[in-house]
Image: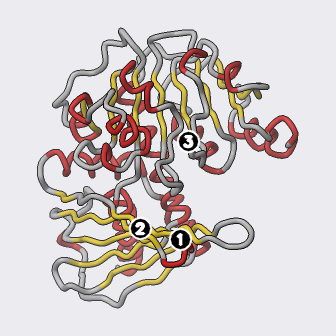
Amino acid sequence: MSANLSAFNHDVAPVFLTETELKPYLNRLDVTACLRDLFLALAQDKAVQPAQSLTLLPDDKGDFITYQGAVAGADVFGAKLSPYLVTSDKPIITAWTTLMSSRTGKPLLCCDSGLLTLERTAGTTALAVDQLAKKESKHLAIIGSGSVAQAHLKHVLNLRQWQSISVYSPSLNEDASLQDRLMTIDKRVQISSTSSACIQDADVIMLCTSSGTPVIEMQDLTKQDVLITSISTNVANAHEIAPSALSQMDVYCDYKATTPASAGEMKLASEQANWTSAEVKGDLADLVNQDVEKPSYQKPVFFRSIGLGLEDIAMAYGIWTQLESSRV
């Protein structure tokens, strides 16, 4: 995002990248810097983030979410389409991002955004952890063990001086290869037998699942000065904590203008009349622009990410600029 924007010609043939073709460019992308620049642009009214939209497919065949965004400084806009397709077996979930030029109105890039979404989801959580977690945080807990959880772990490893890292998922104790994969990421990883054991004494708890229902119980928290982060999935009204828990916490999110209307626990808490979106303390744009106070930790802190179109656009732009730089 901070590249010399005038150096890039937008009147070029669009590029199509599969996941395999995208991976080497994504590995070279500074995700943290990319997302920090994005949220600064959002704070300074140099980017536009509409609300995501959910479209139900006919005959109960599933749905698709459209994530949109535009960044003025980069002269780009675009959207990601993420379908959830019902089948007789497991649902099909894919994602494709299209990057467009606001100089020419032509497409610049169309890419499989599976890995892109994985990295920006973990990177967004990591940015929140860096902004919100106590500096002296030492104990990290992760609920979930799949690719999303692994990406989260990689992104936060160097953010604090972790003394312990606990991981739990229902099937993890029976999957030795997955245990080995997690321990290869960091030797401090310890496998917990239950979710309640995993979050004991944690300073930061990252919920990294595709669950549509709560994966931890508030009564299992042993500390009040804890940061809990949560992500999203396509399941209708998905939530990794109970909606009633919001009133017990200081709540932050990725983008306060749209997240409360989409995040499952926030929607349900509003309907149950025990919480309103006005209680959101701030979002990532506020935090990176230093427009909001950091939490006092008199009670638990909750950060909710739903995934923004702008994050996909910023990441796609970072990939495209690499491609264009290699042509020079």
Q: Quadrant of residue 135?
A: top left
The residue to which callout 3 is attached is 152
Q: Amino acid at mark 2?
A: Ile
Task: Tell me the element at label 1.
Answer: helix
Work out whether 215 lies above or below 22.
above
- Disc 3/disc 2 C-alpha distance (Å): 20 Å
Between 264 and 189, the one lying in front of the other is 264
- Disc 1/disc 2 C-alpha distance (Å): 8 Å
Q: Amino acid at mark 3?
A: His
Q: Dots 3 and 2: beta carbons under 8 Å? A: no
Work out whether 192 lies above or below 17.
above
- Disc 1/disc 3 C-alpha distance (Å): 20 Å
* 155 displayed left or right of 172: left
The residue to which callout 1 is attached is 22
The 10 Å Cα crowd at callout 2, few under 14, some 14 to 19, many 20 or more, is: many
Q: Quadrant of the N terminus?
A: bottom left
Q: Going from the N terminus, do you reach mark 3 or mark 2 first?
A: 3
Work out whether 173 lies above or below 62.
above
Q: Write the residue at 38% across / 72% down.
A: 320
In percent of width and height, residue 240 lies at 53, 37
The residue to which callout 2 is attached is 319
